[in-house]
Amino acid sequence: MTSPGIAVVWFKRDLRVFDHVPLFEASRHSAVLPLYVYEPELLRAPDCATQHVAFINECLEDLGQALAGRGTSLLILHGEITSALQRVHEQFGHFTLYSHEETGNAISYARDRRVADWCRTQGLRWKEYPSNGVVRRLESRDNWASQWMQRMRAPVLNAPDFLRSTGKTLSPSGIMTPRQLGLDGPDKPLRQRGGRRVASKQVKEFFSQHLADYRYAMSSPLTAETACSRLSPYLAYGVLSVRELMHKIWKTREQLQALPETVRPSGTLASLKSFESRLHWHCHFIQKLESEPDIEMRNVHRGFDGLREPHFNRDYFERWCAGETGFPLIDACMKMLAQTGWINFRMRAMLISFSSYQLWNHWREPALHLAREFLDYEPGIHYSQIQMQSGVTGINTLRIYNPVKQAQDQDPKGIFVRRWLPELKRVPDEFIFEPATMPLDLQKELKFLIGPDYPEPIVDHLTSAKLARELLWSMRRDPKMRAEARQVFVKHGSRNPMREGRSRSAAKSSADKPAEPQPQLPLALD
């Protein structure tokens, strides 16, 4: 049944035509106007970078072509969102606004409230639909997992066709370059490219070529680049939906289980289980920001307020950002991020752990730096995970990574380190992860000197980690800290039946036994 009037579909971080509920519902109208708006306040935000806009532009090109092939055109504007909607209103008259709910940063949250006020003032209806498995106005975590599964089990929607376009015109801004939008920083030369076609190719490649290696090869930076799904940026910008991937997992599992065990590729079923779990955790962490938007700015557990903030060391921070800490694995990861916008989950966790424990810096500025560095930056996952890795949630165990041991375990021959730190190519294997321990006469012989050619270690990592561990565990044992940790668990703790699901009674766990299991997962889905 066709609905009268014009529907305006506002695209945000949902740049696709398949499994797009607002677009599907809007297609019932007699005319549909798809709209994307470059918003200056989001572009000026400290978590935005050139690579993000370049990736979005590639997605918009694909999205525009997909919409045109189905009977309508994507209108791209530039400006404050309510001003853009006002222009649409003046040109096209009364319309119904359709969009997904968004769990973004504080700026997008305030923006959405302005849009709601504007729609009420204009007498326009705004229909918002849930995004993936995130539940708005969630009353209790106890039934979140079942609600998530219910959404995932719903059919994947086909891309709709449209009866006609609006028939009117509005001067568009069109796709604008990052420089035109005021972003002067460089794009990342080795980042992934955006768009549905690239994403679909990546899905096919992962499931057909890399699935068997996923579970066992995703931790090492040597193998993760190809073993991981590499779908995180396409999920972050909604080029793919979580539901699409869940249905792909279930279909693939059925196909594999139908094969005789003797011919079934080894490791594929275990990898599917791991990947499915990460899709669940993907939404679980975004739900935390949805339920408590303030965690972008402040500690989840307020008992940790003031712990690191007064001690922020700007020099440490800048050397950490630049990959000049004197710890080769830390520095190599930062160099890779600078070129690619991606690093695997264990290395992300290690970077934050090192910043928070060994350098004792508060997490907020490092979080913003990594937000700009990660192509797959997803605010809900980002801030929830960074706080978890910084030890300020009160419900997760402390995970303090030893950067030397991690290098020995994950890159035993120094291949990854030498790839991203070519200045270390002459350093022998026995010194590759602690080059400052190399005897001076050997340094001179190799024409490689600590200081001029590679920095001294920024801190004594064993001593600083020990001090951090002792202080934080002593704080967590305090009865008042434990009482607040129980409240944090009630609001944010996992009741995930797919893994170590815990009931509400788990909130009574002591500070020494975390109430929420700490998954080995990425800051955004790998």
Image (tube, rainbow, N blue to C red):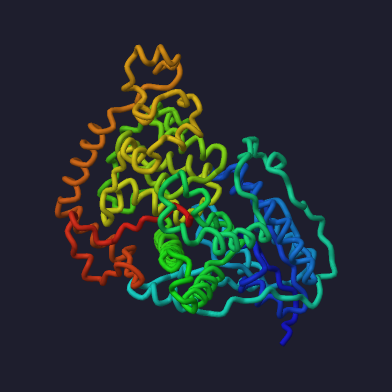
**Is residue 231 shown left or right of residue 86?**
left
Residue most extreme to the front? 262
Q: Nearer the viewer, residue 81 or 286?
A: 286
Q: Residue at x 34, y 73 (%)?
A: 497
Q: Position of residue 23 (x, y in %)?
A: 66, 72
Instruction: Examine the rendered structure and indicate whether residue 423 appears above or below residue 502.
Output: above
Residue 219 visible somewhere in the drawing: yes
Instruction: Examine the rendered structure and indicate whether residue 4 appears above or below residue 46.
Output: below
Residue most extreme to the bottom? 1
Q: Residue at x 25, y 71 (%)?
A: 504
Q: So how many labels did they put on this image?
A: 0
Residue 287 visible somewhere in the drawing: no
**Is residue 485 shown left or right of residue 85?**
left
**Quadrant for the N terminus in the image:** bottom right
Q: Residue at x 40, y 56 (%)?
A: 216
Residue 101: quarter of image: bottom right
Q: Position of residue 249 (x, y in %)?
A: 50, 70
Q: Residue at x 64, y 39 (%)?
A: 183
Q: Position of residue 358 (x, y in %)?
A: 30, 35
Residue 280: quarter of image: bottom left
Instruction: Examine the rendered structure and indicate whether residue 279 appears above or below residue 298.
Output: below
Q: Position of residue 421 (x, y in %)?
A: 48, 30
Q: Nearer the viewer, residue 214 or 53?
A: 214
Q: Nearer the viewer, residue 246 or 171?
A: 246
